Image: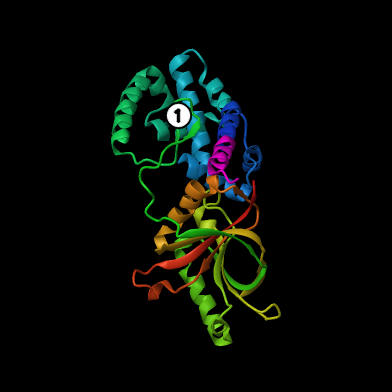
Amino acid sequence: MFNSDYYVQQYIARINRVMDYIEKHLSEPMTLEELADVAAFSKFHFHRIFSALTGESLYEFIRRLRLERAAGLLADQPDLPVTDIVYGCGFSSQSVFNRAFRDFFGMTPTRFRRGGHLEHSKNRKQVSKENQLHSKAGRFEMDKSGELRRVSLTQLNPLIMKNVEIKDLQEMNVAYVRHTGPYNTIGEAFGKLMRWAGPRGLFANPDTRLLCVYHDSPEITEEVKLRSSVCITIPENMEVKGEIGKMKVAGGKYAMCRFEITTDQFGEAWDEINRDWLPSSGYVCDDRLPFDLYYNNAEEHPEKKHIVDICIPVRPM
């Protein structure tokens, strides 16, 4: 019998396991592959899942824990050498630590140790009160022990998936134009592909599909280096050249999550999938590449919205 709460608890347990592992190994280097293995999640999707469930990127979480541990040692052990704190909290050098500490706490480690921690504590209590007044309920939050817990959802995300279907898709032969850079600048690549596909009669075929394949995770890769491929399905023997490339999009089991969204809402839609649907689905992501499958021309939509399936490669837990 399907039990969504069981699967939610499995996701929470995996993320809690990673957070516990990080806390125990703060003084050591940690790789994405290592932490993804601890969570038993695909490396490609692990960053986004972690961020969606905790509200912090993996990098931000590790950095915050290291800095907070260092701050505690500075305040509580005034005779402990700063160099011991630096390397004991996983920083590569004192200069790196000093910059990170100043950016995070708004003061130098020396000032913090000499009384700045009292000022910081007072400010944090005020910020905490303000956040409680203005916070919006979500599905997950940290409790006092640092564990991730499920909480009641009192305010729904305004995007809301229309539906989710699990489908076994066939492998697709596609022509593509590669785009490197922020996803919101992908329009030029779409234009190039359309100008190539139109004269070849591809849109006359009712089975033609337009999609965008994502090769990198925005939680891992610098925005200017993100790779994506704007694609159109083609016959297997069709020839391409120049800027138009040719590849196969892997078949298999996908969660097809239907949205009707504006161009600037794609990031929110992905977050909704990873935060609100995936943990209770009974599935985890695998290492095949995700893609968006488009069903309309947003310019012809009365609200300029894309009707799209965000297609996540999945396997049963």
Q: Residue at x 38, y 22 (%)?
A: 111
Q: Residue at x 31, y 31 (%)?
A: 127
Which residue is nearer to you in this view: 246 or 265? 265
Amino acid on which disc 1 is placed: Asp
User: Which quarter of the figure has residue 46?
Assistant: top right
Is 175 on the left-hand or right-hand side of 276?
right
Q: Residue at x 56, y 28 (%)?
A: 23
Q: Which residue is denoted by mark 1 in the rendering?
A: 143
Around disc 1, counting alpha carbons within 10 Å, would you say few (fewer than 14), some (14 to 19), or many (20 or more)?
Answer: few
User: Which quarter of the figure has residue 26?
Assistant: top right
Identify the image's colour scheme: rainbow, by chain, secondary structure or one colour: rainbow
- Where's residue 114, x and y in %? 38, 17
Residue 284, above or below 92: below
Whether 129 is among the magenta residues is no
Which residue is nearer to you in this view: 291 or 278? 278
The number of numbered badges drawn on the structure is 1
Tell me the magenta residue range: 1-14
Q: Is residue 182 visible?
A: no
- Where's residue 148, x and y in %? 50, 34
